[in-house]
Amino acid sequence: FFSGHMEGLFPCGEDGFGDRVEAAMGGRGLGDNEADMVAEQLRLNRTLTVLSLRENKIGPEGAISIADALCSNDVLKELDLETNNIQDKGAQAFLDMLDSNCTITAMEVNNNTVSPVIVEKILARCMLNTQPLAMKRDMPRIMANDPTIKELDLSEYANSGVSCELLTDGLRNNSSLLTLNLANNDIGNSGVDALCGIILRNTTLTELNLSNNGIAAQGIKDFADSLKSNSTLKVLDMSNNKCADDGARTVIAALKENNGITSLNMRRNATSAVLLKELEYCCSLNRQPLLLKQSLFRVQDNDKHLTVLDFSDMIDMEQSATLLEPALVRNTFVTTIDFAGCYIADEGCLALSKVLLMNSTLTDLGLKSNYVSLEGGRHLANALQKNQTLAAMNIANNSLGDEGAHVFLNALVDNHSLVSLTMEMNEVSEALMDELDDALYLNQQPLALKLALPPTFRSEENFTEIDFSVYDGKTYHTDASVKLLSRALMHNNVITKVNLANNNISDAGAVSVADVLRKNKRITSVNFSSNAVGDRGCLALCDALTENSSVTKLDLENNCITETGGFAILNVFKTNNTITSILVRFNKISPTLESDIQIACAINTQPASLKHNAPRIREKDETLQTLDLGTFDGHKYYDDVAVTILVHELKGNSTITTLNLSNNTFEAAGALALANWIATNATIIELNVANNTIGDLGCQYFATAVEKNTTLRCLNLENNNIGDRGIEPFLSALAMNDVLVTCNLGRNDISAPLIAQVEDALAVNTQPLVLKRMLNRVADSDPTLTSLDLSEGVDGQRYGDIACKLLGVPLSLNECITELDFSGNEIGSPGAAYLASALEDNKVLKIVNLTSNQIGDEGMFALAHSLIPNDTISQILVDDNPAGQDSVGELDFQLVLNNQPLLLKKSVTRLANNDPTLKSLDFSNGDKPVTDGSLKLLCTNLLMNDCLTELNLSGNQVGPRGATFLEEVLRVNPNLVIVDLSDNQIGEEGGKALCGALKQNQTVWFLNVAGNGISFETMEDINNAITINKHHSNSTFFPGSPKSGSPRSNRVATPLIKALPGAFSDSPARLAAAEVYVDDDVDFGDHDYQREVEHIIFADAMVEFQSQAVI
């Protein structure tokens, strides 16, 4: 059967597998018979390593046959039986076969109706065939939890990570293996990852060697995490790997939670010596009691919740103290450690001394009932000399003796924090115990006291001040510490200042200091501020001050002193002249009494005159009306402080009317105090502060006071460094003040204009108040104020020159007042001059009444002169004044001018002065009509004028009387050529007067009198006279004369030659080019006479032409 099937079944026919290494026989429908044939070949073959029988029909029997053959085969490594029907029976045969077969490493039995458990076991056995023989040999026993297997050595096999997975499976339920050696393999990070499972679950393994396995930092980290949950592993060797510092740190972190590992080798891992030392330290902790380790790590981590370490009665803690040292040195929260009954000896004390030298938070150390000897005591005492935080130490029931007590006593000289030292049962003498108690009591007091007592007792020269005001962070000074200090101060002759502020000192402490002040004559300043001193302590201090002459300053602020103590302080000043400052704020003393105390202190520092006068000022001595403090007493000037004190005393005084503070040294602050007093005082009349340095600011303060004061009339601010900035607000203040009339501002840096303004403002206050009130209305041009009546003065006070001066500028700018009445006053020439100056600029005032005053010629002339530029004043009444007729006449003349047409007023002077530029005057359509009176004034000046040639008076109110004035001018004035009197009121009488004048006048060739009610005959006579005058004037043309035939002309024939300039300049032959005519509208009445006139005019024109005259 075999031979018949061999050829088609096997790759090599009858030779079976031949020399092949691999054979694929899958998918051929092979059954159990064929499996038997394959099994026979496997027993014989020595080359085949891979065999595939998948997808056949091999059943359990065939599988058993193949399994039996493989028991003796040591070549085949891989067998594929997938998708057959070997079932659990066949699979179990293969599983049994793997117990003896060590070469098959891969076997596939899926899809064979085999339970998963058996499949998994088969795979595990195959994988085990890849591992060292020892592992394969012992692993089944390990998996079976064989109690006889305690150690497993798998070192030096260069295994892969798969071994670790197998170990993990094998050791999962093992409870007997104690030691596992995997050194010198190549398990790497993946293998360590598999081993983590062992560490997490195994509870019996105590020793593990993983040295030289290529494990890197990540693998170490994973392994370290598993160590946190393991409590049985004691020895771990991870040397010669690649964990570096990062890996070491993760192990250190794990060891803080792992309490089992006591030995750890991590050398040759590129790890720093510091980390190696810390690893060793962590392992050493695991050799200590668990409580110590747990506490130590919290100390090391500076856990803020861990403040007390209680190791009492834990045996053999000598090494533990050494272990705690580095952690406690850096800890900032632990305050109490108790090592009572822990077998601590001198070595442990050395470690604790190092802690005391570096730690600044530990306050309580217990070492009761240990083995501390003199040497250990020295260690601790030496540390205490520098430690300033430990407050209590219990070292009772040890072996220190007197010598050890001396060591601690010497340490307390430099130690200021230890207040409790228990040394019972140490064979220490009672005397030494008492000395220790005294030293500890001193440490219970503030440090400043302990440091101050030795130099105070010795009166050291450089130690002159005691300052206990700064809290040392532990204790305040109390009555007890002050009592200790007082003993030292009693005979001290160097210290001058004692500062006890900001403490808990009460009456008892103040009494102790008072006793010192009765004997000590060197102390000048005592500060008790912010304590708890009451009236009893205050009374004791005051009583001592009545005998003491050295203390100048006592500070009692912020205590518990009432009015009783306050009055006691005030009484001190009756006999004590040296104390200059007692501060009592923030007590139960009324503000008034507190102020009185401060004033009393301040008076002791001020000029003698202040101290002498203060009681009289305070008591309102009626004989003290003038207070002269302007004389230097040889000791002290009045400065800002002195003036402030003086003002305090002056408040409420109603007798002083004159105060002299000149020639002192006060500045703006003193000025402020004075200003505040002046603002409310109702009696001061005169104040002299000359020759001080109040400056601009001080002047501004006085300005504020002047606004409110109603009595001060004289103020001397001379030589006070005041400039314009200071005086400007003062000037504004004077507008609100009605009483100040004198202010000396000399020798300051004030501009002249501002000085003048101040003087004007002061002058206002010399006048009746109604004038001052009126000035503002005048200056503001109050539209309701059109008439200003200041006649007869006010309440018997007459207005004078100053009133006129004050009114001058506002009046010059006023636009509403038309009438001013100053009658019945005392105005002289200066006042009139001030008014005159105002009238020059005023444009609305019409009537001024100055009757019944004292104006002389100078004033009258000034008023007259002011009317030259003034065109509005129509009336100035000056009756009953002492001025002469000439000045009054001049004023009247100017008034007359002011009532004339403006042109007439402005022309009179020019006419009188014979101004050669004044050729023509036109009064037609003027601001006022020319009347007979106006014409008289004009004609008076025309009589002697030889320049004016043309006068136009048309359209005015000239009557017959005015015509007579003009008649006189025409008779004597040889220069007037043209006169226009049309549209006036001359009438027949005036016309005849003018006609009569023309009989003597040969120059006027144009006279227009139309519209005057003159008869035709008189008009004709005037025309004839004018015609004759034209003939006699040898002139045919008068520049500027009205054209013949103009409206309202009296139709006098006017010759007019119209010719271009130079028309006749070549020869008489060109005369024909000229047009010579007489106005055809003129009616001469007699034609013969008309022709005669024409010939005369023509002949005259030819003469003028030939003489080269300008036509």
Image: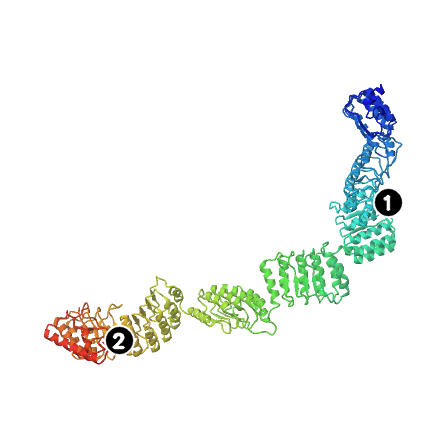
Horizontally, is 905 left or right of 435 in the view? left
How many residues crowd around disc 2 within 10 Å: few (fewer than 14), some, or many (20 or more)? some
The colour scheme of the drawn protein is rainbow
Q: Which residue is mark 1?
A: 316
The foreground one among 116 and 658 is 116
Of residues 631 and 917, the one nearer the viewer is 917
- Could you tell which of marks 1 and 2 lies nearer the N-terminus? 1
Query: Which residue appears at 88% of the width and 34% of the height?
Result: 150
- Residue 444: x and y in percent read 76, 54
Q: Quadrant of residue 952?
A: bottom left
Secondary structure under badge 1? loop
Placement of the N terminus among the 4 image quadrants: top right
On screen, 377 above or below 653?
Answer: above
Number of other residues with Cα within 10 Å of mark 1, as a class: few under 14, some 14 to 19, many 20 or more: some
Q: Nearer the viewer, mark 1 or mark 2?
A: 2
Image location of residue 383, percent across then percent down: 81, 55
- Residue at x 49% of width, y 73% of height: 746
* Amino acid beneath label 2: Lys
Residue to which mark 2 is pinned: 919
**SS category of the residue bearing label 2:** loop
Q: Nearer the viewer, residue 336 or 939?
A: 939
Real-space Cα separation, disc 1 to disc 2, in angstroms: 144 Å
Task: Answer with the quarter of the image where residue 958 lies.
Answer: bottom left
In the image, is residue 471 above or below residue 927? above
Whole-percent x, y for residue 106 in the image: 81, 30
> Considering depth in this image, is 164 or 301 the residue closer to the camera?
164
Quadrant of the drawing holding the C terminus: bottom left
Q: Amino acid at mark 1?
A: Asp
